[in-house]
Amino acid sequence: MKKVLFVVEAFGGGIFTYISDLANELCNEYDVYIAYSFRDETPVDFKKYFNNKITLIHVDNFTREINLKKDIKAIFELKKIAKKIDPDLIHLHSSKAGVLGRVAFLGRKMPMFYTPHGYSFFMPNISRKKRFMYKEIEKLCSLSRCITIACSKSEYEVSLKITPKSEYVNNGINIEKLNKLITSPNESEKGNLRVATLGRIAYQKNPKLFDKIAGAFPNDEFIWIGDGDMKNVLTSRNIVITGWLDRQSAIRKMEESDVFLLTSRYEGLPMSLLEAMYMKKICVVSSVVGNKDVINKENGFLCENLDDYINVLSRIKSVDTRKQVEQARADILQEYNTESMAEKYKQIYRKYLDDHSLVLKRR
């Protein structure tokens, strides 16, 4: 079988779910290797999420932030890993792995792919100068032979401004695995609401806005499933912070809620949103790249500001949302599922592997 090497620094949260689901779908057709690092949100028992056919390789010097000394060491680690494995193709995941991987594997002739999962220059909490720098780094790295595979249509449109060598495959969730964790996709009950979100309590997820929304509905319960260094801004008395939970416990908390609320400043295409849609939760999300690719007035609510969120949540208490949640679930079954996602990746991989073989034969 052909060998695939995944390189992923952001080995937690939605990207972890995406990586484990995709790798498990691919491992019957490819020998799959994953070079990874730990994050706070990486599950303690992360190995059990992967088929035993998959080889996991820890990269000691991967770090979330820029650290020149460690980044250089990580580049040499990746070179050593690739030399040992001799993969037929390489797929880099997230911005940090995308930059270091394209430097490490510069000059290698096999097909190479990069999925940003939300470009780093989307981050509004960094200076304009840094955003410009990150964007220029992406442009510079795009001069390599690497193909960008965006995880949503909006991210694809952004990627085309960086490089014409772009494709896109929508994120998808593993419905079979999710069905084993949920009891039944509950429908919302009117009256007091239970409003949940899931993810790291960090600037990207805009916990300050989440707190303001909760403060406007003191009689409703707001649940943040996760943890993070900005949890101190969640001060409203009706907010419960669960901390990091194992997957089954996190899904159970989602089941108990009526509304899935996402206040993100930027996204790729969040797995938690796709899962909430499948579980028939009323989805109220920020109108940003990724979210707006899947949510529309037919299957949920897009919000631009605090007033939008307050108005939508107030309406939900009195209007019938069954048609919207049914449409959201139907959208997942049709498009945003792991089987569909993996098949599209396989098609792209085969295409470039075949092209690469033709080039080698001509030589």
Image: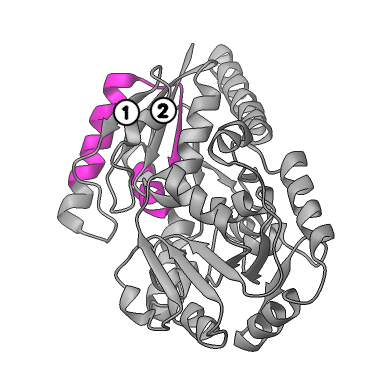
Which of the 4 image quadrants contains residue 314?
bottom right
Residue that label 1 marks: 56
Please, which colouring scheme is shown? one colour
Q: Are marks 2 and 1 in contact (CB under 8 Å)?
A: yes
Residue displayed at 51% across by 48% down? 251
What amino acid type should be assigned to the residue bearing mark 1? Leu
Residue 236 % position (x, y): 42, 83
Toward the left, the furthest residue is 69
Report the disc number at residue 119: none
Disc 1 is placed on an element classified as strand
Residue 283 % position (x, y): 67, 64
Q: What secondary structure is the stretch in magenta mostly built from?
A: helix
Residue that label 2 marks: 50
- Say which label, 2 or 1, has the lower sequence index: 2
Chain part drawn in magenta: 73-101
Disc 2 is placed on an element classified as loop
Magenta stretch holds residue 27: no
Residue displayed at 42% across by 54% down? 95
Side of 68 where 251 appears, left or right: right
Task: Please name whichever residue, 137 or 258, is drawn nearer the observer in this view of the structure.
Answer: 258
What amino acid type should be assigned to the residue bearing mark 2? Phe
Above or below, comparing residue 198 to residue 59 in the picture: below
Residue 20 % position (x, y): 46, 35
Side of 10 where 275 appears, left or right: right
Side of 201 where 322 appears, left or right: right
